[in-house]
Image (spheres, rainbow, N blue to C red):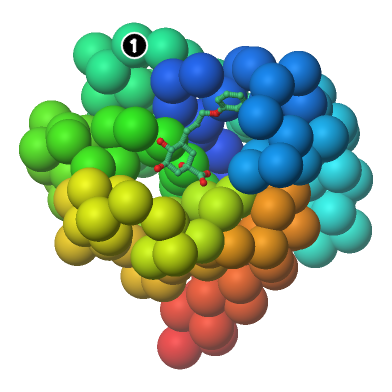
């Protein structure tokens, strides 16, 4: 069995369409590409990644609840639920593990309704506007965060 600390990477609704539609906003990289690259980067940082996508808010809440006690951290792109879901916020606040929020696009450059994030209230930090690279920045930041808290 692996002794690597496990990081849950959660992706919200419609992110399964990445690479196939709206490349001018979200790029050409698919979610499978991101999953592969994040897992490879995590491996070098002595972390393992459980990469998930769901179009369902309740499933995302359950995945966050399941991460409590079984994962060392959560990286989340809640997609449209970022701007609407108190249920996801409450689950993240109850998770008791570090949360990093990621968005492919710069949500502050876009429509007003994307400027507010419920997820941010539970996140240690937010990475947005760097496309798929944001997930790699997040895994790096998570490794540093965990090493920092572990060495205290
Ligand atoms: O920029 C991001 O990562 C977002 O979380 C993406 C969400 C959007 O609602 C947020 O405001 C910002 C949308 C994800 C939908 O992804 C698609 C990908 C390809 C084609 C269509 C949708």
Q: Residue furthest bottom?
A: 152
Residue at point 82% right, 35% down? 29
Res. 90 image quadrant:
top left
User: In the displayed structure, would residue 114 be above or below residue 45?
Assistant: above
Res. 98 image quadrant:
bottom left
Name the residue that disc number 1 marks: 56
User: In the displayed structure, would residue 88 be above or below residue 149?
Assistant: above
Residue 54 image offset from top left, x and y in percent:
46, 15
**Which residue is nearer to you in this view: 79 or 3?**
79
Residue at point 39% right, 36% down? 78
Which quadrant of the rendered structure holds the N terminus?
top right
Residue 147 image offset from top left, x and y in percent:
60, 76
Q: Residues within 10 Å of mark 1 (few under 14, many from 20)?
A: few
Question: Is ligand 1 less than 8 Å from the beta carbon at label 1?
Answer: no
In the image, taking residue 142 as reference, residue 29 lies left or right, namely right
Residue 101 image offset from top left, x and y in percent:
43, 55
Which quadrant of the rendered structure holds the C terminus?
bottom left
Label 1 secondary element: loop
Res. 69 image quadrant:
top left
Q: Is residue 119 visible?
A: no
**How many tags in the picture?**
1
Q: Is residue 76 visible?
A: yes
Residue at point 17% right, 34% down? 85
User: In the displayed structure, would residue 21 be above or below residue 59?
Assistant: below
Residue 120 image offset from top left, x and y in percent:
27, 60
Residue at point 39% right, 65% down? 108
């Amino acid at each position: 069995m692996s002794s690597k600390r496990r990081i849950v990477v959660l992706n919200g609704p419609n992110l399964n369409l990445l690479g196939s539609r709206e490349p001018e906003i979200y790029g050409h990289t698919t979610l499978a590409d991101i999953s592969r690259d994040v897992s490879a980067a995590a491996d070098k940082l002595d972390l393992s990644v459980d990469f998930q996508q769901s179009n369902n808010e309740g499933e995302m809440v359950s995945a966050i609840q399941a991460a409590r006690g079984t994962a060392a951290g959560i990286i989340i792109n809640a997609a449209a639920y970022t701007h609407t879901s108190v249920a996801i916020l409450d689950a993240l606040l109850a998770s008791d593990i570090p949360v990093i929020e990621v968005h492919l696009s710069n949500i502050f450059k876009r429509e007003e309704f994307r400027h507010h994030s419920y997820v941010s209230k539970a996140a240690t930090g937010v990475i947005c506007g760097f496309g798929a690279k944001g997930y790699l920045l997040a895994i790096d930041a998570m490794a540093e965060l965990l090493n920092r808290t572990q060495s205290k």
